[in-house]
Image (cartoon, grey):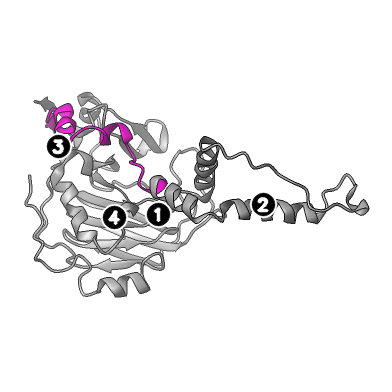
Amino acid sequence: MGNSIDKESLSILGDTSAAEFLQHYWQKQPLLIRDALPDYESPVSADELAGLSLEPEVESRIVEENGRDGPWSVRHGPFEEDDYQTMPEQDWTLLVQGADLWVPEVKELLQRFDFLPAWRLDDIMISYACDGGSVGPHFDQYDVFLLQVEGQRCWQIGEECGTSTPLREGTELRIIEGFKPVQEWVLNPGDMLYLPPGVGHWGVAEGECLTFSIGFRSPTLADMLGDLAVEMITQGNTQHYRDPELTVDMASREIHPAFIDQAKKQLFDLLNDDELIEDWFARFMTAPKYPELEEQTEEQRHASVRGRRYFNGDAVD
């Protein structure tokens, strides 16, 4: 295991202050931070990461640019030792979600992001990539810090993307069709790249590398409304729709605009309840990503993984 983080060292934002970052970069534009954590040693080796992917409790994926199921194929864990014995020497990536749940030293990294609300954090994902490994050009709808921990990765940054961005068919990954980079950086160990939501990007390993992705949750507004509706039903909210004051000219097969205005007003009035929204929002945004694991103690989670690791094709306990 690597060293824990020195709290007395310089800010993870380098020469950029937290106030400057929040004002000029957060959810606005990318920021490359050289030597964000220059002396950081990974608490998890590539072998140990592969070992975690053998466990059924751990969410993991392998992405191959040219896999058995075609371009940009994805396989989901848990994996077997034989899966790694048959992997090619390049162009694939292993990704393990929620590494902060399984490795206390990884969780310590979160202390360095105390300039952001702690409840916005989603998880820390660790990716191992061999030479040429990547997950393709894509965009996310959440904020992410990409910390290069071992090896090098070349990041190409594209334009802002959205619902009209063309995506490649035949893969579950959201691969951007015709990706065109506008910036390019090679990250070395200790360097970090911040990306706001919606920015196209493509990170390709130059040799073997480990990258930590510190992601911040960003649910869709539709999901939020759906959860709020369930909350209101659970609380026994029985308010019903009521018509606006009717006139004779509103009695037609077409819906008069007054009905739309009335529906909007009633819904707005329903949501205009600070106590309700405050209570619901706090619980919704702090709900654990893996509730069944969060209920376990740290010792129980570590015991369930059993410390199995993958070394040169052999799993050891």
Residue 151 visible here: no
Camera-side mark, 1 or 2: 2
Q: CA distance from mark 3 to mark 4?
A: 27 Å
What residue span does the magenta drawing correspond to? 284-312
The earlier-in-sequence mark between 1 and 4 is: 4
Magenta stretch encompasses residue 103? no
**38 and 252: which is toward the camera:** 252
Dot placed on the residue nearer the N-terminal end, 3 or 1: 3
**Quadrant of the frame with the N terminus:** top left
Q: In the figure, is residue 254 to the left or right of 317?
A: right
At label 2, the amino acid type is Gln
Relative vertical location of residue 264 with respect to residue 240 in this rendering, above or below: below
The residue identified by callout 4 is: 118
Q: How far apart are labels 3 and 2 at the CA level?
A: 55 Å
> Quick one: label 1 or label 2, which is nearer the N terminus?
1
Q: Residue at x 23, y 51 (%)?
A: 211
Residue 93 % position (x, y): 28, 42
